[in-house]
């Protein structure tokens, strides 16, 4: 981390402060500066309140894993689910998520990131109510659609909110929190599935939703959003609350205000041709597309059914829980290593939960241009979940006709291709401020992204 980038938060009276300095200090000095700026715990509280939405997202996504086997043997004729209905039950969530991504394109810029996250609690709570009280398959499908819609909104809003309230020194760790909480939500669902019936699993899903909306009532809006709406005084108060009274938050406010001023106009069709706009958007969209093509969504949605067909030693429900635990351990490793090792190296060497899961969400929030961030993040989520819908809708049908080997071979080929995409197209953003990242795409000067910690 660049020491002069840290100075606005340390209160140093350096009149020669530059937003994008080209001289970098020793890493040990940088780390000491970083720790000195992170004494305020309120930032972490705000992040925790927001990522409860991701916990709910992960929980709702894999709800079908223990439920489909239970419904296959249901003694209620209206709830006994066929193979085609299973494929719709698993995939309709992703259609809802795509619709939520579209909505977020407007909600993020109109309501703001925080209120968009809070808004998602309404369809989520209603969706769980439908599934918990279902008397027919149509109620299950509607509940999945609504919880998917809520997930799409949060998937587009939470990473942006976190990136805009975070300090650069911990943006990597905090940026991984959405994925950590999504994985934790999935693990809790698998664990509860060992003891609870499918109706009570839906009831339990209401708890994180209600907790999230209560906590977010006391959390601030993003300073960048407030400045973009002309609420400068409120933005200063938010930065003071997030950074602490003894930091020079006024200088950070001036940095953000200048960045917002330079990009205050709405994006035009002509500007889309500007590499500063289309390159980061294209990279983010392709990352989300390739992430889904790796097959993670259909595998998680049908995890217990997959284990049933493989006839391994343990019961399928225990196998699913083990997978959830491994995913959680992997994403925790990623969270605490991406600010040291860097984003790209983890994309190269990992499996999904350590790299392509958390890092693609983080990079999306880091590289998208501010003037198009709300719309572009919604577009990324739309592309992601439309891809997930196609895979999830036909996964069971392909397995039925050709076996597990065909889809898993396809996923393996995609993962191999992701290595080439990472090497050629993905920038390293470790330790860079959002303003530096924007300047890199605007000017093409790699000096803004050089000398990582």
Image (cartoon, rainbow, N blue to C red):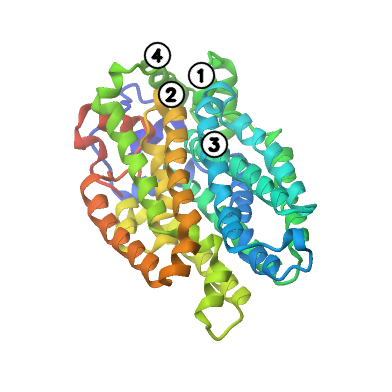
Whole-percent x, y for residue 143 in the image: 69, 47
Q: Is residue 248 left or right of residue 350?
A: right
Q: Which residue is mark 3?
A: 99
Is disc 2 in contact with disc 4, using a CB cutoff of under 8 Å? no
Quarter of the image with the N terminus is top left
Tell me if mark 3 has few (under 14), some (14-19) or many (20+) residues whose alpha carbon lies within 10 angstroms of its own. Answer: many
Tell us which disc is closer to us: 2 or 4.
Answer: 4
* Secondary structure at numbered mark 4: loop
Whole-percent x, y for residue 362 in the image: 43, 45
- What distance separates the C-alpha of mark 2 from that of mark 4? 15 Å
Q: Residue at x 33, y 43 (%)?
A: 286
Tell me if mark 1 has few (under 14), some (14-19) or many (20+) residues whose alpha carbon lies within 10 angstroms of its own. Answer: many
Q: Quadrant of residue 53?
A: top right
- What distance separates the C-alpha of mark 4 from that of mark 3? 26 Å
In the rendered view, tell whether residue 361 sits above or below residue 263.
below
Q: Which residue is mark 2?
A: 256
Q: Residue 227's mark?
A: 1
Q: Earlier in the sequence, mark 2 or mark 4?
A: 2
Tell me if mark 2 has few (under 14), some (14-19) or many (20+) residues whose alpha carbon lies within 10 angstroms of its own. Answer: many
In the rendered view, tell whether residue 260 sits above or below residue 295.
above
Q: Which residue is mark 4?
A: 265
Q: Residue at x 55, y 41 (%)?
A: 152
Tell us which disc is closer to us: 4 or 3.
Answer: 3
* Secondary structure at numbered mark 3: helix
Whole-percent x, y for residue 404 in the image: 43, 71
Q: Earlier in the sequence, mark 2 or mark 3?
A: 3
């Amino acid at each position: 981390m660049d020491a002069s980038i840290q100075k606005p938060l340390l209160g140093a009276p350096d009149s020669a402060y530059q937003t994008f300095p080209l001289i970098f200090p020793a890493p040990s000095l940088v780390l000491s500066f970083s720790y000195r700026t992170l004494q305020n715990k309120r930032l972490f509280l705000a992040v925790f309140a927001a990522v409860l939405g991701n916990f709910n997202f992960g929980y709702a996504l894999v709800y079908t894993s223990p439920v489909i086997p239970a419904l296959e043997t249901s003694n209620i004729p209206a709830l006994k689910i066929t193979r085609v209905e299973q494929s719709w039950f698993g995939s309709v969530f992703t259609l809802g998520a795509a619709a939520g991504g579209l909505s977020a394109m407007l909600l993020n810029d109109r309501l703001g990131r925080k209120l968009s996250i809070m808004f998602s609690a309404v369809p989520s709570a209603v969706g769980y109510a439908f599934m918990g009280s279902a008397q027919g398959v149509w109620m299950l499908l509607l509940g999945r659609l609504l919880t998917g819609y809520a997930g799409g909104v949060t998937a587009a809003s939470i990473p942006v909110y976190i990136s805009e309230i975070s300090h650069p020194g911990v943006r990597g760790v905090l940026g991984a929190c959405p994925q950590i909480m999504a994985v934790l939500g999935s693990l809790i669902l698998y664990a509860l599935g060992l003891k609870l019936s499918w109706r009570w699993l839906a009831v339990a899903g209401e708890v994180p939703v209600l907790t999230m909306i209560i906590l977010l009532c006391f959390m601030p809006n993003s300073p960048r959003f407030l400045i973009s709406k002309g609420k400068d005084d409120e933005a200063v108060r938010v930065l003071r609350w997030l950074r602490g009274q003894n930091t020079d938050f006024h200088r950070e406010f001036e940095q953000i205000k200048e960045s917002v001023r330079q990009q205050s106009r709405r994006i035009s069709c002509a500007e889309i041709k500007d590499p500063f706009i289309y390159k980061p958007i294209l990279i983010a969209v392709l990352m989300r597309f390739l992430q889904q093509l790796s097959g993670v969504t259909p595998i998680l949605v049908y995890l217990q059914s997959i284990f049933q067909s493989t006839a391994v030693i343990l019961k399928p429900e225990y196998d699913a829980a083990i997978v959830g635990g491994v995913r959680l351990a992997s994403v925790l490793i990623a969270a605490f290593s991406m600010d040291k090792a860097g984003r790209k190296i983890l994309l190269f060497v990992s499996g999904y939960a350590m790299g392509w899961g958390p890092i693609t969400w983080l990079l999306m929030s880091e590289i998208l241009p501010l003037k198009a961030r709300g719309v572009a993040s919604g577009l990324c989520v739309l592309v992601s979940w439309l891809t997930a819908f196609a895979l999830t809708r036909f996964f069971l049908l392909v397995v039925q006709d050709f076996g597990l080997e065909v889809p898993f071979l396809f996923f393996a080929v995609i993962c191999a291709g992701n290595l080439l995409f990472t090497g050629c197209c993905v920038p390293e953003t470790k330790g860079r401020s959002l303003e530096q990242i924007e300047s890199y795409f605007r000017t093409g000067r790699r000096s803004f992204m050089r000398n990582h910690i």
